Image (cartoon, grey):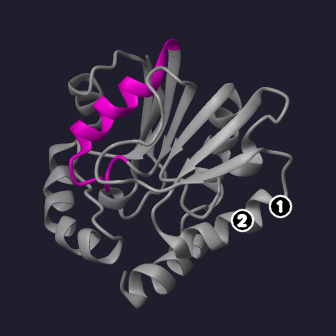
């Protein structure tokens, strides 16, 4: 992994990735995770403090970036969570079929190269009554903003390790085998709208 990917990028994410509007939504949704939890792209561990340790028995934190794991460990020490870090061998999640109760993905589905295949892997490991909790950047419903998202996407892709601004997250969840139960969306900042259109909700 490059110096940028291992050191500079984790620093950027830790400094820029959890402003107040994002943190408030994390507080609202992450506490609903329960049982054995798989967090996809745990990053710097920004979600860790929002899990309810009385509801979560085990947290598998899937994160291939060593620099991110170093930052996540600092967050883990602030909690009582039982966390086990997982690397991603190829595109296969290293867990047994139907072995987790909740899957959490925040600002990750926009960066996975083969996202539909990854979602099918999540479907495989999720128990029949389990839920996916997601919070993602995605394609705006405003055509003018979409055009700006398309213009900015090459920059986002290079600066944030493969980030796409134009992914239709609910549609991708459907392609991966999930039914979206509910979804909310809004611009988390007035400017630039092309970088701040987010959606969150649950799927099963």
User: Which of 8/124 is in front?
Assistant: 124
Residue 14: horizontal and vertical position, in percent? 59, 71
Crowd around label 2: few <14 · some 14–19 · many ≥20 (10 Å): some
Residue at 35%, 60% in the rendered image: 195
Q: Which mark is residue 195?
A: none
Alpha carbon distance from label 1 to label 2: 6 Å
Residue closest to the far bottom: 3
Crowd around label 1: few <14 · some 14–19 · many ≥20 (10 Å): few
Residue 55: horizontal and vertical position, in percent? 78, 26
Residue closest to the far top: 129
Res 139 quadrant in image? top left
User: In the rendered image, which residue does mark 1 sit on?
Assistant: 77
For label 2, the SS is helix
Residue at 47%, 23% in the rendered image: 126
Image quadrant holding the N terminus, namely bottom left
Magenta-drawn stretch contains 114: yes
Q: For the magenta stretch, what is the residue range?
A: 109-129
Residue at 25%, 69% in the rendered image: 157
Q: Specify whether 186 is left or right of 53.
A: left
Q: Specify whether 92 is left or right of 63.
A: left
Q: Which mark is residue 73?
A: 2
User: Which of 22/117 is in front?
Assistant: 117
Vertical placement of 76 versus 160: above or below?
above
Residue 44: horizontal and vertical position, in percent? 60, 64
Residue at 21%, 48% in the rendered image: 114
Q: Specify whether 81 is left or right of 113.
A: right
Vertical placement of 79 versus 2: above or below?
above
Magenta-drawn stretch contains 60: no
Residue 9: horizontal and vertical position, in percent? 45, 78
Q: Is residue 141 visible?
A: no
CB atoms at circles 1 and 2 under 8 Å apart? yes
Res 72 quadrant in image? bottom right
């Amino acid at each position: 992994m490059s110096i940028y990917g291992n050191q500079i990028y984790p620093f950027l994410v830790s400094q820029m990735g959890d402003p107040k509007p994002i943190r408030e939504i994390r507080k609202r949704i992450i506490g609903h995770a329960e049982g054995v939890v798989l967090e996809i792209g745990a990053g710097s561990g920004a979600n860790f403090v929002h899990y309810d340790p009385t509801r979560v028995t085990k947290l598998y934190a899937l994160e291939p970036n060593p620099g991110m794991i170093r930052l996540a460990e600092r967050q883990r020490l602030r909690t009582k969570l039982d966390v086990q870090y997982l690397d991603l061998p190829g595109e296969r999640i290293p867990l047994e079929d139907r072995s987790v109760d909740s899957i959490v993905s925040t600002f990750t589905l926009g960066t996975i190269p083969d996202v539909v295949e990854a979602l099918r892997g999540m479907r495989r490991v999720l128990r029949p009554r389990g839920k996916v909790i997601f919070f993602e950047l995605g394609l705006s419903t405003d055509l003018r903003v979409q055009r700006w998202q398309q213009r900015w996407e090459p920059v986002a892709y290079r600066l944030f390790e493969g980030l796409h601004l134009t992914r239709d997250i609910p549609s991708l969840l459907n392609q991966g085998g999930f039914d979206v139960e509910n979804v909310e969306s809004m611009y988390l900042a007035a400017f630039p709208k092309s970088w701040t259109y987010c959606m969150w909700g649950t799927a099963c």
